[in-house]
Image: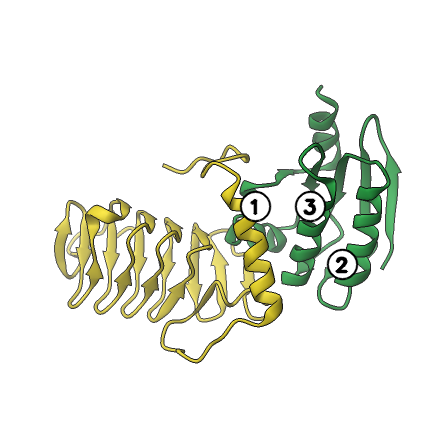
Amino acid sequence: MNLTVMPGDGYVVVQPDTDSLDVTQAVAFKQQMVQVATQGEKRVVLDLSTVAFMDSSGLGAIISCMKALGRDGELVLCGAQSGVQMLLNLTRMDRVIRLFPDREAAAAALSGR
Amino acid sequence: MKALNGEVSGVSVPGKEIAPGIQAGLNVRIRPEACELKPPIYIGGSATVEDGARIVGPTWIGAGAHVAGGAQIFRSLVFDHTRIHSGATVRDTMICGSYSVRSDGTVLDLERSDIDFLVRDARDTTAALTEDQRQLLDLLDEFHKGISPDAPSGSTET
């Protein structure tokens, strides 16, 4: 599992190259996400449009990244497919993390446009 | 759901009205004044709704179900003997066994997603959290404590 990292205007977009963020991928995903968060990037867009399935391990990795970003940073999600959205709804993560339909909407929000 | 809304002629919701628009079967354990309830709601026999639960109708809670305090259920159908954890939000969904089916047809396999500790069989008294599940719950609690109930998605439920 690798993350594609694309710099933006005051933020960075990351996208995993997997369709399943489960227990088999979560460790590598978490390591790379935390690495992005600790490299000075404070605003991160996680593009989940390729991810059809996520389990509690993937969710835990996202939470770890949020913790690594700290209070002055922000992680937002975009492109979440319906099953992933249901997981976020059920666990109430949609109350602590902003969700956007696509990368452009997330970037616009983070850029303050 | 249409029956709960009174939209099906000749069909009446069973049970006794314990509060305006809240019907309950036999042996239901609930203190309506200690919960946030928005009718119409039906609660099946022998179900338990703990203090602090939030249920927005039209919602059908099946017989023997258990809704923990802090759980939130919006416009949903919860099958018999389902336990909803305090950290769970069920919205526009049918909960049946380990499957959650949203009104748009999306299916979430709770067991495969390893979040069946949030929604599980209320009769299974042996179920214990794994260490990973406990850690995830602690992390979720930590985040939820620092936010207002309706922040930040803006999808305030009424």
- The chain displayed green equals A
Q: According to the rendering, which colour does chain B have? A: yellow
Query: What subunit carries mark 1?
Result: B
Residue B83 screen position, x and y as percent: 39, 66
Q: Residue at x 87, y 43 (%)?
A: A5
Quadrant in which residue B66 is drawn: bottom left
What residue is rendered at 43% in x and 62% in y?
A: B95
Find residue A94 and name its label. none
Looking at the image, residue A32 sits to the left or right of residue A69; the answer is right
Residue placed under numbered mark 3 in the picture:
A67
Q: Amino acid at mark 3?
A: Lys
Q: Which residue is mark 1?
A: B143
Q: Depth check: give the residue in front, A96 or A113.
A: A96
Q: Quadrant of residue A61?
A: bottom right
A57 is higher (above) or lower (below) than A42:
below
Look at the numbered discs 3 and 1 and tell me whether their residues touch, using CB distance below 8 Å: no
Residue visible at 59% across and 50% down in the picture: A85
Q: CA distance from mark 3 to mark 2?
A: 24 Å
Kindly identify which residue carries mark 2: A19
User: Do dots 1 and 2 share one subunit?
Assistant: no
Label 1 or label 2, whichever lies nearer to me, is: 1
Amino acid type of the residue that numbered disc 1 sits on in the rendered structure: Phe
